[in-house]
Amino acid sequence: MGGLESLSPGTDPDRPIHIVFVGAGAVGCFYASRLHHPSHNIHVSLIARSNYKALAEHGVQLQTHTFGDYTFRPHAVFPSVAAAAANPSPSGAGPHEWDYIIVTTKALPDRSDDSALIAPLVSANSCIVLIQNGVGVEQPYRTRFPATPIISAVTVISAEQTSPGTVRQNRWTRIHIGPYSDSASFSPPSDKATASYPRGDDTTGALTPTGASPSPSTTTGNNNTNSSSSSSSSSTPHPTSAALQQAGAHRAALLSDWWTRLGQIRDVDLAADETALQTIRWHKLCINAAFNPSAVLAGGRGNADMARDAELRAHLAGVMREIWAAAPQVLGRAFPASLAGPEKILRSTERNVGSKPSMLLDWEAGRPMEIEVILGNPVRIARARGVEMPRLQTLYALLRSAQEVREGGKKGRAEKGKL
């Protein structure tokens, strides 16, 4: 799997390591800043959009609760994936490939395929890291890059970009990381392994039944999608799940070491195995799938406000209990006793006065929401295993409809303005 595999956690790279973050929002900029260590031969670059000019000129100004105030000056800042793929080493240090491609954008599979977006960056030595919300986010990448190590990551952090290029970290730094091979795929009963499952209008590759053939248009048989010598998927043997887990676990251990030993983040948790990481993803749904859509549908109420309202509190607890009951059936493993249950989450949320969940912020700003990965995917993945989630399905149906109606109204007004 390339030169990185010779490194062991606790050692420094014997050659330059180049890491690129796709998405330069608050979360991406914070974790990038704690991973950039040129004196240890680890170089981090950013791909930015709306804040590109500020980052390119001044770097990232960080105001953190944990590490104080400091400026992060990336190795390079690019305005697009195309620019990072065409000229990965603008400093003149010589050509290189991206060793780690860390995706921190919002997961919007109903709007775009981010696995296709990053394809120009992926080479034979690359590892893809997904720091994104929801479940099922990994499978489109696994389908497109069947031989590339993938690391899945779940964060618990409060951070915001207060102005272009300025990031404030308010609380927490925890990040859970672990390898991903194919655990977010459907695993239907063996007698239905070849059945065709309804996928809806806005589903993602996360819903491809295990053993099914990926779409030829989204699959490469070789990690290097830019290579003219790439073989077809039919002629290139793909690594086994065990091999992908081993490679992903090694890369995750390196990241954990760099973030902990060099970046001084004390709560980087390395998942014991692939299912353990997916368990963390489903546990985070207890917060995201309960509070995010409810804040929008309740008319714009914040988290603490909802938790203090008797009827909304009962509703939120019901959603969380539904996830708590469904996840062990989906994953084959119960939530660890160390993870906060619904009542503890609600009590903690009561103190989070003034906090608005991300879906509400997106709704108020007229942006698309992460409906599919937080609501749609868990409903469909659970259903494929014979588990219904009626509360989550109701939230999904109502919120998706609300977004479609609003966007249809915008489209109608735009068309009317053209007359």
Image (spheres, grey):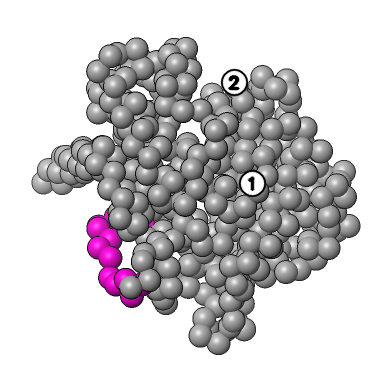
Cα–Cα span, label 1 and label 2: 25 Å
- Residue drawn at x 52%, y 81% as measured from the top left: 233
Q: Quadrant of residue 367?
A: top left
Q: Are marks 1 and 2 in contact (CB under 8 Å)?
A: no
Q: What residue does disc 1 label?
A: 271
Sequence-wise, which precedes: disc 1 or disc 2? 2
Amino acid, disc 1: Ala
Q: Examine the structure image and report whether residue 208 is included in the region drawn in magenta.
A: no
Amino acid, disc 2: Asn
Q: Examine the structure image and report whether residue 196 is included in the region drawn in magenta.
A: yes
Q: State the extent of the magenta-drawn residues as a range.
A: 192-204
- Residue drawn at x 66%, y 59% as measured from the top left: 248
Q: Quadrant of residue 413?
A: top left
Judge whether residue 329 can be spotted in this image.
yes
Left or right: residue 347 compared with residue 28? left
Left or right: residue 306 compared with residue 183? left
Left or right: residue 192 compared with residue 84? left
Q: What residue does disc 2 label?
A: 170
Residue 57: x and y in percent read: 67, 36
Element under label 2? Answer: strand
- Residue drawn at x 88%, y 57% as measured from the top left: 14
- Front residue of 323/199: it is 323
Residue 395: x and y in percent read: 26, 37
- Residue drawn at x 47%, y 60% as measured from the top left: 139
Element under label 1? Answer: loop
* Disc 2 packing (10 Å; few <14; some 14–19; many ≥20): some
Give the dominant element type of the magenta stretch: helix, strand or loop. Answer: loop
